[in-house]
Amino acid sequence: MPSDLKSYIRDIADFPQPGIIFKDITPLLANPQALNQASENLFALTLGKKINKVAAIEARGFIFGSILAKMLNVGMVPIRKPGKLPAATIKTSYSLEYGSNDLEIHKDAISQGDLVLVHDDVLATGGTAKAACELIEKLGGTVVQLIFLIQLNFLNGKEKLSEYEARSVLSY
């Protein structure tokens, strides 16, 4: 088993825009032991929580979101960019470290009283995760916890999520 998951995270300079250092998780995903360890570490963050849905944010969030849903024996709800979901949706806008965007969720994806774990691969400014929480709450769900593989501390995203429990496996 790999002991240091950070050794499987690659920095890519100037992606997707000049000045951004992108944390690339594909080397971690390519290594079965690192993938398994990361999955187990994420799952451990959920212990003791009552959760009946995992909401995963496009696109890299879908990878571990699906794994977590399987490990928790609950359903997975995709949160996507506009125009990617086939049924009726609701939408919200948000800011991120290099621009702005919109997110959508199916109107029937969350039921009143659902206890939802939100997952994305990276917590940067917190805008994407906050928007996902807003969508879940608009549909009557309760955000139990947010978990991330990576947290970029210097961008202070956790501050934007201060009303929620937000945890990560790796911090930079």
Image (tube, helix red, strand yellow):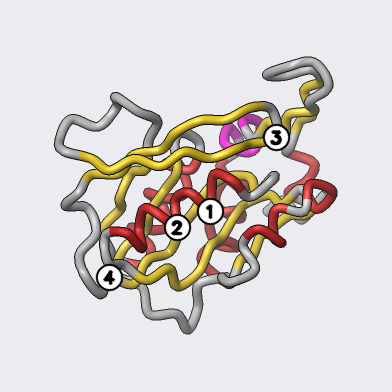
Residue beneath disc 4: 114
Residue at image location 78% in from the left, 25% down from the top: 20
N-terminal label among 4 and 1 = 4
Distance between mark 3 and mark 2 Cα atoms:
18 Å
Q: Do the residues bearing badges 4 and 1 touch, measured as CB atoms within 8 Å?
A: no
Residue 74: which numbered mark, if any?
none
Is residue 110 found left or right of 125 in the rendered image? left
Residue mark closest to the camera, 3 vs 4:
3
- Sequence-earlier tag: 3 or 1: 3
Q: Secondary structure at mark 4?
A: loop
Query: What residue sits 53% from the left and 40% below the top?
Result: 94
Q: Which residues are magenta?
A: 26-30
Tell me the quarter of the image containing the N terminus.
Answer: bottom right
In this rendering, position of residue 116 left or right of residue 31: left
Picture mark count: 4
Residue at the spot of label 3: 97
Front residue of 73 and 117: 117
The answer to whether the residues at label 1 and label 2 have Cβ atoms under 8 Å apart is yes
